[in-house]
Image (tube, rainbow, N blue to C red):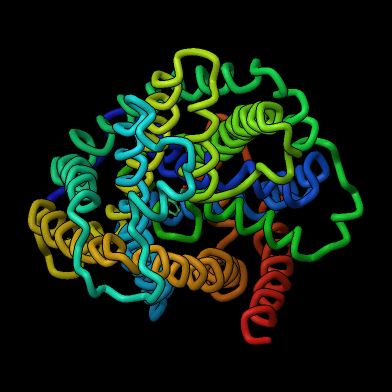
Amino acid sequence: MSTREQWGTRAGFVLAAIGSAIGLGNIWRYPYVLYENGGGSFLIPYFFALFTAGIPILLLEFWIGHRYRKAAPYALRDLARGWSWLGWWPAMVCFVIVTYYAVVLAWALSYMYFSFGLQWGDDTKAFLYGNFLKLTDSPSVVGGLQWHIVLPVVIVWAIVFFYVYRGVRKGIERANKVMIPLLLVMIAIVVFRGVTLPGAVDGLNHLLTPDFSKLANPQVWIAAYSQVFFSLSIAFGVMITYASYLPKRADINNSAFITGLANSGFEFFAALGVFGAIGFLAHVQGADVKDVASAGPGLAFVVFPKIISELPALNELFGVLFFGALVLAGLTSAISLVEVSIAAVMEKFSWSRQKAASIVCGAAFVGSLVYTTGGGLYYLDIVDHFINAFGGLLVGLLEVILVGWVVKKTAEARAYTNTMSDFAIGSWWDFCVRYVTPIVLGAMTLLNLVKEFR
Ligand code: PFF
């Protein structure tokens, strides 16, 4: 049997895990989630979610990957016979996510180009929906592909393919070693500029002023858990897959804490820059911060272009840095998303990495094309909603039930990672995985289902 591919260095693995975690979710989702769910007071449910589910599940997935050294479905099958479906399901979810994640990256790439000469003009909303996406009223693929979007999609897929084709050490690790440091420098400049603009303080006040009354709202807690899951890339098979490439001895405990804290630190930092910049736009327009703030595509492709146009100086440079940061953050996440499927089909069909990467990326590329039609955004919304309702949380819940109650291996897992880590995890972890996490995730899942079918 051939030996499993491995990370070249310990830093390589941690960077790749951080690269998967830090993505579009940190830059365009988190700031608004924080703002909308109570600002400063949202940090309470957020950190609660991070320490009761985020980091404990990350540790659990690192253990599963490292202990069983297989792609997610097979690692889970070895952990508990008959449970491989719990690996195939997130692998499928990842595949669907990456088909549109890549398209959003392609938009960011296009906007990097549009930054030169501030090509979006004055009405950035009309530019996005009209000139660029050319949205049609009816959701149809009729009218065919829009080649000006297909081209950047091809570029994004070519980059992703290049790295996953080359393998773990020469591809994925190398990509993260280059892209993550570069991303940090770029985002640091963007944030520094964001918080030093006139009006920034007002934006930050809006972002951070606590609203403790929100803590009584269960939706706020769901928002915290959903954000932590998506942002940390847990319960998607990614962290199991990445940990399966670790060498025999690895400091799993340390890696889980570093990854979790780096991801949260990054998103909090990015949120300061985003809301500083939003405060600036409100200041220039004489508007209220709450009327300017927005999330998702609206934030990145409508509000930010406007901000960039209004900057007093170096507008184009700021545009390239902001959209470049989105592209880099997203690329390392997209690489992790396809790697879940690649690793799984390599094992399923005994394919070579090259064959698996070609087929998975080829199929995902074709899937991406749906979103480059006039009805693209419409499909993106439906799929995104579906994934949020049935991805992450539910898989996370099943994982803790499996390990905590079905195979009852929390003590074994903790002993395993403790023997090879710098510091030991206490029995709080077992308690968390067996009681706290399933109870809160169970409650969240129920609430989600009620909301879905009401
Ligand atoms: N964590 C990424 C983000 O915050 O954008 C998105 C993501 C990557 C989610 C990988 C899930 C995943 F498996």
Residue 333: image location, x then y, percent: 38, 45
Q: Quadrant of residue 355?
A: bottom left
Locate the C terminus and report the quarter of the image it occupies: bottom right
- Taking the spot 30% from the left edge, 40% from the top edge, the residue there is 110
Residue 404: image location, x then y, percent: 61, 67
Locate the N terminus and report the quarter of the image it occupies: bottom left
- Taking the spot 38% from the left edge, 76% from the top edge, the residue there is 138
- Taking the spot 30% from the left edge, 60% from the top edge, the residue there is 99
Q: Is residue 287 among the parts visible in the rendering? A: yes
Q: Residue furthest top?
A: 313
Q: Is residue 214 above or below residue 6?
A: below
Q: Is residue 252 above or below residue 59?
A: above
Q: For the image shown, how many numbered marks are present on the structure?
A: 0
Left or right of residue 454: residue 153: left
- Taking the spot 22% from the left edge, 70% from the top edge, the residue there is 143
Residue 235: image location, x then y, percent: 49, 60
Query: Is 422 in front, or is 271?
Result: 271
Q: Quadrant of residue 402?
A: bottom right
